[in-house]
Amino acid sequence: MQPGEGDSFGDDSFGDTLGRYRLEAKVGAGGMGQVFRAFDTTLRRRVAIKVLRSPRPPDRDGRVERVLREARAVAALDHPGVVAVFDVGEAHGHPFIVMEYVVGRSLRALIGVREAPLGERLRWLGDIARSLAAAHRAGLVHRDIKPENVMIREDGAVKLLDFGIARQLVDPDAPAGPGPASAAPESTMLGTPAYMAPEQIQRLPVDARADQFGWGVLAHELLTGSLPWRGPAEGVPVAVAVVTERAASVPATPGLPAHVAAVIDRALAKSPAQRFPSMDALVHALVADEPRWLGPPTLPSTPAADTTPNTRADTVEPAPAVARPRRRAPLFGALLVGVLVIVGVSLAPMLRTAPAPAPAPTWSPGEPARAAYDEGMRRATHAALNAGSENMKVALEYEPEFAAAHLRLALIGLIDGPYPAPSEPYHAAARLRRHLGERDQALLDALAPAFEPEAPQLDEMIDRLGALTRRFPDDPELRLYLPLALSLHGRDDEAAAKFRSLLAHDPGSATAWLGLAYIHGGRDELATARDALTRCRALAPDGVDCLWYQLKLDAFTGRCADMEAGAVAWQRLKTNDHGAVITRVHALIARGRPAAEIDAAEAEGARTMSVALHTIAGQFTDSSRQILAGEFLAADQILDDLPGEPGFSAYDRLGLGELRVALHEEMGDLPGAAAIARELRLRKGILPNVGFILDDGILADPTPIFDGVLLAAGELTPADVAARRDAWLELWRARGGRHHEGELWLRARAGPARTAADAREALAALPPGAPVRRFIVDRLFVVDVARVHLLAGDPAAALPLLRAATRSCLAALEPVRFVQAHALLGRALEATGDVAGACAAYAYVHARWSAARPRSRTAEDVDVRRTALRCPAPA
């Protein structure tokens, strides 16, 4: 029956449409609601919509809000093995979730089916484990792993369904023993008893290792046709068996690798501590010895009569491919930290013209994989690193054992971010080492120290790359990797010399020009940096990374109109890149454009972002606009809610906390600032051990600033702060921070300084010859340095820093520092006798914050100074 023919799908309260979605047929129902096949009239694609049963406001137990919140978390996951969530919303009082529509067969229908060969079943288990590992890295635990929640699509792809009872880990970044942080116990039992971990049945705290247990039960059943427990398969008896009985081992079967049964046995351990420390560790154990079943998928053999679409709650027909937005860095890092995308990988044509340093490996890919790989090499070298990595992923879809593609994917991740670089591609290349030639095996060994699990050893990696370059002196790829690694580690003088040597040999290397641009930009040699970028863009007109860095230079130097124009050009080059939209919005705010124009640009971003990302980006921008307008309480409420959104890392949370601490200090709320600092200081753990690239990691770690606030609040003594600062410096230097003394001084000394004594002590501690960068992408740390000079009685040294800060286009990214910079500029101008200039700077602060709610300490001080100077009344 078609919609409109008298069938409202069993619920007349919402009819046949939900917003822009036209309901076509009911395809399932469950405890939380009903599922419909629907048509998205805007994007013109078929989707599945889960309409929740409990309408608001009677949602007293929070179930609806929990499901919607976790739907947003799944939307941010963006993994091919997980059914995609496109949208969440509410219409006619009913919350709903819009998902990918998949046609295929439930894994339940394939258990015990002879037509499903052992190799296929093993491949399915590996794919399910990888999807769970990705979810766990994103901070999600599924908690209901069972055959009914896995679909085998018609093309053989495996899809994990129904995160309806998934839960975000309470604090995936805090130390919590051998596994991820535990979630609080539930008041009600959620899940299916036969597949639930003992701790889940007993309502104890649950973490990611509960999914490992569910995977083990599913794996046992898929390989043997039965559960690992005796007696009934459901109800109280099976729950008792899960808690008390030892799971039966998977019997030896012809063709079944012996280690697979051992992996399943360990996953089914009663105690979480006895299971694998993570799902990633389980995956590595599962694919040990490189079994044959890692090859490309084949379609499951299915009876001809069983071809109707499965009507499970989350299933739909295959939707048209949707390009995924680029993830340059963790979101708050992209907005505030601005991770430096440092350069690319070399040209495939360069490799073809260079003499081969070693015999080719005996293994070779098929033509489609080779073509994708070559295009990836070309695009990465043409300053389109993310596009290059996407091509490598395409190559791996054709040939999962393409070790060279895994190796280049690891390299691009190490160079381009987000940081810490994912280690999976490197380990995959290492596992497939026999498929690499002599030279690539040597490159694999050279990179090994960068992927140490505890603390990457970049100095050791650089030494090995240097030795490898001397071994193969004419290899253009290696000649590029060494300066990239040097620049990555802050050894810019050495990197610049090697970039120039490479360019003397091959002036057409766009990535080398981009590398030089970053080095000169970091030294405030902006004219030289712009020249290098001009050459880079001429060589690679479709290279996003050259344009991206140009936008950062424009933002810092106050070329806000150029910044907006560049963002529009970026949108033309990559229509699905959310960074272009965000940059354009920031440029509009910096230019003081009307609110309606800014709102329209933000709305446009919805087409390029996931729901979660659009929510976070919009909320952060809203908070910045509120801060700039003096609506401090409203802004703080938005910022307080943001960490509850999916996609936040430890560094994101710290950056957000630093902004909130500054805002509470501005409001005169020292106890509130101290409470935020105290909580984040306790939760932070030892951030240098998470593998973040050093200079960005140092700049993203506000621990000394938190300690300074706690000192001001009387919660720490000066001796406590000094000891903590020394420990912080020791940790970063132990990881190689000795190459970043300027960044260490900036965060440990300049940032916390609030008195003249602090400032004098900070300047005395500045290491001789240590460069203090003025141009730091997306951050106004120059304001902290200027404050130190001003407090120490040297306004002349502060003036150029403050002029740079106040003319920048970073108001939306650093709203507190940006307005405070105008007040400090006024003080510096006043101290040097420029009364008119001081009055103009003070007038800006007055216009922004004179009516701030609840108050602005900076505006109050400025108004006193304006009166003393007899500044003209505001217009």
Image: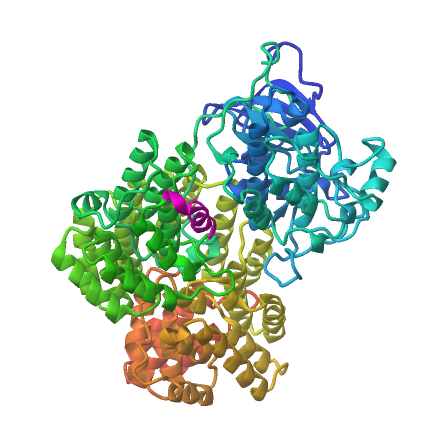
Does residue 106 belong to the magenta stretch? no
Visible residue check, residue 874:
no
Q: Position of residue 545 (x, y in %)?
A: 29, 50
Name the foreground residue: 495 vs 788. Answer: 495
Q: Position of residue 79 (x, y in %)?
A: 51, 39
Residue drawn at x 65%, y 21% is 113
Name the foreground residue: 136 vs 279. Answer: 279
Q: Is residue 757 above or below residue 639?
A: below
Q: Is residue 770 above or below residue 63?
A: below
Q: How many marks?
A: 0
Does residue 429 belong to the magenta stretch? yes
Magenta span: 423-435
Visible residue check, residue 356:
yes
Relative placement, left or right, of 240 versus 647 is right
Residue drawn at x 28%, y 85% is 833
Residue drawn at x 61%, y 43% is 259
Locate residue 769: give its quadrant.
bottom left
Quadrant for the N terminus in the image:
top right
Relative placement, left or right, of 670 versus 319 is right
Locate residue 827: give its quadrant.
bottom left
Quadrant for the C terminus in the image:
bottom left
Classified by dominant secondary structure, the portion drawn in magenta counts as helix
Relative placement, left or right, of 756 versus 261 is left
Q: Is residue 678 above or below residue 180?
A: below
